[in-house]
Image: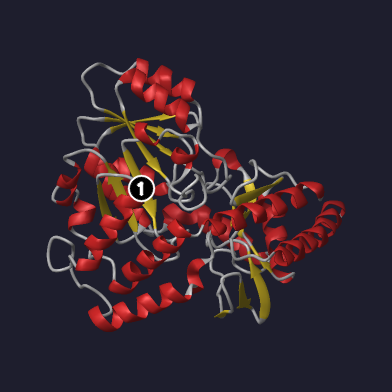
Amino acid sequence: MDIFDKYATIIGRHDKVLEAGTDPFAVRVDEMLSATEAMIGGRRTILLGTNNYLGLTFDPTAIDASVEAARRDGTGTTGSRIANGNYAQHQELELELAAFLKRRSCMVFTTGYQANLAMIAGVAGPRDVIFMDSDSHASIYDGCTLSGAKVIRFRHNDPDDLDRRLARSPEGECKLIIVEGLYSILGDTAPLKAFAEVKKKHGAWLMVDEAHSLGVYGGEGRGVAEAQDCEADVDFVVGTFSKSLAAIGGFGAANHPRFDCLRFCSRPYMFTASPSPASIASARASLRRMANDPNLRAAIWNNAERLHAGLRQLGYTVAAAPGPVAAIRLPDEATAVAAWNRLLQLGVYVNLAVPPGTPNGACLLRCSLSAAHAPAQIDEVLGRFERLSQSLRELATA
């Protein structure tokens, strides 16, 4: 028996995807031309699937800060935060993030994935119960597993179902609710205000992952909780640097007076090398830009409205209301793969999202907007989606 036999079905599905053309899960970017364009397969391609929401990957101040930090502090820390990897910049970024988020304390992690592992497995333990939205990101699922807590899933974005499940939970247990602000596959937002009311009713704790909503939602860009005016009811905030902040890393923040005990109680924090000086420096620069430039949020929302309206006018079914993510529903996996390949041939890169990584078996073309997209680029993209429509009609009648 081969140790990889357990993946035979997945490997078979991947082989069929390869028969249709380019591997959508291993696209090679030959050259980055800007925050919104790249050379892929010898073709100038508009990037519409990068999560570069504020378009800051080429921000000159962030680049200069990154280069200066690498020259000053080296390319890596070679140690965890509790060993030799606790640099001044890590702590300075934590203070700046805490101030921006209006939280008492903040911890910085090496990746956004690790942030969820560390926060969930640090906050919850084997004697606790986690109530998790069923559409949660893989890092949330893995953090729950690592915690050893009892895990109860509730229906996606359904406060009433959460209420019923919490009502059946025994007294005396610590109950942690975990939801996301913006769900990155379909692009829908959580009813956080309603979840907060359920949390208070049952004396639970609430953790919100604002990875895809930071910088985009809220008057100051703190996320969906700010936009829905319920930040005070959110006990723990998790986020990443790899979306709006255009770097790599993650964070957790809270007002709890004992929150910093996670620095010596959360294993993913304790035993992972700390973020590189370059990543921290660029994240700090991008945070300042995000906090002080509301035009970035205005630009991405204008682009989102333009793309969503155009796609619907062309007859596409978009999974959620206008926002930084536009997920287009297609009838089956074969159609989605063919559509993805055709778009790439037309010079537009989007994400192919198929089961098991999608809710309820959905097959999607996932687009993500950027503040750096020019209106003319959005119009060009819509023109290519119009050409895709013709290709899909020909495919359906073949």
Callout 1: helix, strand or loop?
helix
**Quadrant occupied by the C terminus:** bottom right
Q: Is residue 276 left or right of residue 222?
A: left
**Considering depth in this image, is 269 or 290 the residue closer to the camera?**
290
Give the residue displayed 21% in from the left and 72% down from the top: 77
Give the residue displayed 51% in from the left and 54% down from the top: 10
**Considering depth in this image, is 64 or 124 the residue closer to the camera?**
64
Q: Quadrant of residue 168?
A: top left
Q: Quadrant of residue 368?
A: bottom right
- Residue 124: give x, y in percent of width and height: 24, 37
Which residue in the structure is indicated by mark 1?
A: 101
Question: Is residue 368 visible to the viewer in this orientation of the structure?
Answer: no
Instruction: Please tell me how crowded label 1 is: few (under 14), some (14-19), or many (20+) other residues with Cα within 10 Å.
Output: many
Vertical position of residue 234 compared to residue 32: above or below: above
Give the residue displayed 20% in from the left and 73% down from the top: 78
**Quadrant occupied by the N terminus:** bottom left
- Residue 89: give x, y in percent of width and height: 25, 67
Amino acid carrying mark 1 in the image = Leu
**Considering depth in this image, is 117 or 260 the residue closer to the camera?**
260
Give the residue displayed 49% in from the left and 29% down from the top: 155
Q: Is residue 287 left or right of residue 56?
A: left
- Residue 223: give x, y in percent of width and height: 46, 45
Q: Is residue 182 left or right of residue 250?
A: right
Vertical position of residue 349 compared to residue 235: above or below: below
Q: Is residue 213 left or right of residue 248?
A: right
- Residue 149: give x, y in percent of width and height: 26, 34
Question: Is residue 181 visible to the viewer in this orientation of the structure?
Answer: yes
